[in-house]
Image (cartoon, coloured by chain):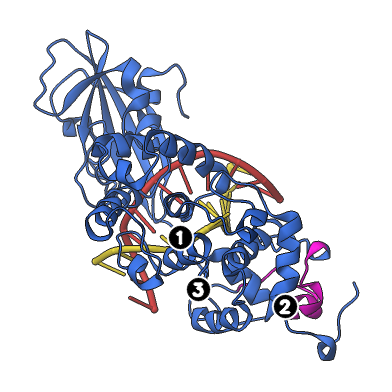
Chain colours: A blue, B red, C yellow
Amino acid sequence: MTLTPRSQLTRPEASLLLAWYDRHHRELPWRVDPKMHAAGIRPDPYFVWLSEVMLQQTTVQAVKAYFLKFISVWPTVVDLAAADREEVLKAWAGLGYYARARNLIKCAEEVVDRFGGKFPDTVEELASLPGIGDYTSAAIAAIAFNRRALVMDGNVERVISRVFAIEMPLPAAKPLMRACLDAITPQDRPGDFAQAMMDLGATVCSPRRPACVFCPWRNDCRAFAQGDPEPFPFKAPKKEKPVRLGAAFVALDDAGRVLLRKRGEKGLLGGMTEVPTTDWTARQDGATDPEAAPFAADWQEKGMVTHVFTHFQLRLTIYFAKVMEASDDHGWWEPVANLEGQALPTVMKKAIAVAIGEKRQK
DNA sequence: CAGACGTGGGA
DNA sequence: TTCCCAAGTCT
């Protein structure tokens, strides 16, 4: 590999990255072509906001279909603010991090109530809205309003850490990275610059096996000059996930309906729909016992669902029972044919599939 | 600052 | 299979 001597390292120029972006940018449903930007056409701030919230810790591939569904049903932030809350949660089901959906609704309402249905155009005002933090406020200000803001997400952190060979681990290195980003963020085309940084991080300056040969900053990159960009950024070692146990109870009545209930508004899967479950605990005893069912029935063990959350692994024992007398004290009865449209998180769909589907998980 | 907070896909 | 993660925010 040919290394650039330290003495020849040059400043990473925004113009070089922007030229790369003009040729190699990704086309995404929420974007406007950079050529249109030059003509003064900006993307809809509602689209930018919605996509940025969906993209938080979530892959582009997963977001596309959800984004199209949302703008089809709720074309403007005013429509979303007026939407039925349950319908929004149902539309979000499966995307994960459900606090985002709760904050999405709150944010839409505040945009209507506080800002007359128009997104504010400053980082400060944007960051005052629910679910909009440092990253998203800067991204909306830059992309939708072409303001010079410091847009720093995981991609940008990786690019910056490599270009400047920052060996300090995250998250301690964030202020330093922000200063480096400030030094290279241009006054001109800040929105395209932000998206270019993220596209570069996603397609060229990737976490593993970065394609440095295609990088417009190849000759400006200290990590490349040193010979091994891949390990950047350095991160504190992660902790192992504890295991929690529980049981889920899938009841089917003689009309072919499943008993569902609503989870509390806060915390894990807050506001979403579930089948009755025990608490999920680290205990090895009793947590998976059919005695813990919401009501007595001929509960039969149907299998196990393992589901990995961000901070723990869940092992759910799945029980199934046919119920003659359908009491609704514990929730409501939903026809099996309607389950697809419910606000059911993936772990709950897995539990139901094990109980009434043909397939059994291990 | 560190922990809570989901999911599906790729190596 | 197992690990790592992907455009973070809130407390």
Q: Earlier in the sequence, mark 2 or mark 1?
A: 2
**Residue displayed at 42% across by 66% down:** A137
CB atoms of marks 1 and 3 within 8 Å:
no
User: Left or right: A227 with respect to A173?
Assistant: right
Reply above or below: A44 against A300: below
From the image, tell me which residue sits under label 2: A13
Which residue in the rendered view is the most extreme toward the front?
A39
Quadrant for residue A314, please give it.
top left
Q: For the residue carrying disc 2, how many other residues have a C-alpha within 10 Å: few (<14), some (14-19), or many (20+)? A: some
Q: CA distance from mark 1 to mark 3?
A: 36 Å
User: How many numbered callouts?
Assistant: 3
Chain designation of label 3: A
**Residue displayed at 32% across by 19% down:** A338
For the record, the magenta segment spans A214-233
The location of residue A95, given as percent across then percent down, is: 43, 42
Q: Are marks 1 and 3 on the same chain?
A: yes
Q: Is residue A358 magenta?
A: no
User: Left or right: A294 with respect to A199?
Assistant: left
Which secondary structure, mark 1?
loop
Which secondary structure, mark 3?
loop
The amino acid marked with disc number 1 is: Glu
The amino acid marked with disc number 3 is: Ala
User: Left or right: A168 with respect to A217?
Assistant: left
From the image, tell me which residue sits under label 1: A240
Which secondary structure, mark 2?
loop
The location of residue A85, given as percent across then percent down, is: 24, 39
Chain designation of label 2: A
A323 or A262: which is nearer to us? A262
Q: For the residue carrying disc 1, how many other residues have a C-alpha within 10 Å: few (<14), some (14-19), or many (20+)? A: few
**Residue displayed at 61% across by 63% down:** A192
A44 or C6: which is nearer to us? A44
From the image, tell me which residue sits under label 3: A149
